[in-house]
Every structure is written in structure tokens, then in C-alpha cells.
Amino acid sequence: MTTDNTVDARLERLTALDSNTVSDALDFLQLPGATFGLRPLWNCPKIVGRASTIQFAAKTPGAGSTVHPITPVIAASRGTDRILVIAGGLEGVSCWGDLVANASKAKGIRGTVIDGCSRDIEGSESIGYPVYGRGITMISARNRAIQVSSGEPVKMAGVTVAQDDYLIADRCGTVFVPAARIDEVLDLGERIARRQDGMVRAILAGRSVEEVMHDKEFEAIAVKR
């Protein structure tokens, strides 16, 4: 059983890394998780947390009134380690805005990652609420998109993300880590960070960059030291 203290310790270790290093660790372990195109939608800070997954889909004609997407997940959210992970955004249609940003911040949610677009981005920025996604639009999701599930696995930029998976998002993009593999990803990511710091020091000390960046040097990262 995973305790809150264990989760907090993992999140602290993940926060000390960056998306590039975590992506490299996943490469070494031959795990998917790094995405392309899910970037900060304002100059927001790095976010690290666990996924609360939400699936969007197009609203069918005649479906009638529905609860606004995302709001049931925000209302039910507990704890302060959550990041909303929203899949299935429609091209050019918003699946995020300032009202849900304010509600999320009030609940202690750390941020939102959308495989889609956001509107009202100044509203999220004005309260310091991080939003990552594909782009910005003004077109509302109302009567165009609905929430069809939550807490189930979703596809984010081609990567399957499950409820409670870990993620890190910064200026270079968004990386997801399966919860079952987080410990080995963290261990390897920390080794990569230490090794790369040593490589920088070697270059600054005068060692040839050609030698320092040889494939054999990177292959050595995967060896425990």
C-alpha cells in the first residue's frame, strides 16, 4: 500500500528533475511517456503531481443539458497532489477556462494538462494556475463537447495515462510516468542528472566535447554507481 508520505517523497524527487531527464530515463527503460505538443499555455511554472484523468468527446445532437465537463472531478478532488489530465479535446474547441481554473485552485489542484485547447488563458494566468496543452482558442465547449468518463485510462498525445500516474510538465513539455514504474524511473533519472552534471564539469575543465558526448558515455549512465 502506498502511503501519503511515500507519494510526497516521490513527488519531491520528481520535482528535483526536469522533463528532459525523465524522458531520457524512460528511453533507457524503453517506456512510453514523453509527449510532443503539450506545452505551457502561459509562462507558468513547472508542475509535478499525480493524474486525475478526464475523457472528452463531441456532444451528439439532441443530447440535452449536461453537467459542465470537469466540474464533477474538481468537486470530488481530495488532497493536494492532483493534476487534471484531460484527453479528447476537439480541434479549435476549448476544454478549459477561467471558471474551472478558479475552482481547481480553490481545491488545491496543482494544474491542468489538456490534449486540446484552453480559452480565457489570462484568467488562469492571473491567479497563477498552470495550464499545459496544445493551444489557445476562444470557442466554448458548451454544446460542443462533453465529459464521458473520469478516473479511467486516457490517451494523451499518443501516450496512455492511468489515474494516479505521475507526471512532470515544464517549458520543454509534458512527461507521464506509470505509477508502477515510478521508483525505477526516479532512480535512473537521478543517476542521469548526476552523470550529466559530471559531463558538463568535464567539458568546462577542458575535456573534448567529442569524447564526453560519445555514445559510450551515455550508455554508462544506465549502470548503477
Image: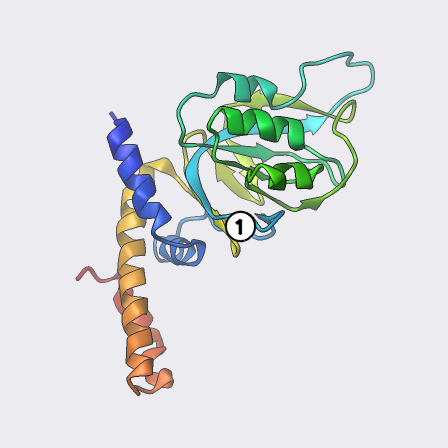
Q: Residue at x 36, y 47 (%)?
A: 15
Q: How many marks?
A: 1
Most distant residue in the front direction: 126
Residue 153, placed above or below residue 183: above
The percent position of residue 63, horizontal first and vertical second, equals 77, 14
Q: Disc 1 marks which residue? A: 35
Tell me the colour scheme of the image. Answer: rainbow
The percent position of residue 117, horizontal first and vertical second, equals 68, 40
- Residue 94 in view here: yes
- Which of the 4 image quadrants contains residue 130? top right
Q: Is residue 17 left or right of residue 111?
A: left
Q: Secondary structure at mark 1?
A: loop
Q: Residue at x 62, y 48 (%)?
A: 42
Q: Amino acid at mark 1?
A: Thr
Nearer-the-camera pick, 137 or 115 = 137
Residue 62, placed above or below residue 216: above
- Quarter holding the N terminus? top left
Nearer-the-camera pick, 174 or 40 = 40
The percent position of residue 212, horizontal first and vertical second, equals 32, 79
Q: Is residue 208 left or right of residue 6?
A: right
Most distant residue in the right direction: 61
- Which of the 4 image quadrants contains residue 65? top right
Badge 1: few (under 14), some or many (20 or more) residues near its Cα, within 10 Å?
some
Q: Residue at x 78, y 38 (%)?
A: 138
Q: Residue at x 33, y 83 (%)?
A: 211
- Residue 216 in view here: no
The percent position of residue 188, horizontal first and vertical second, equals 28, 54
- Quarter holding the C terminus? bottom left
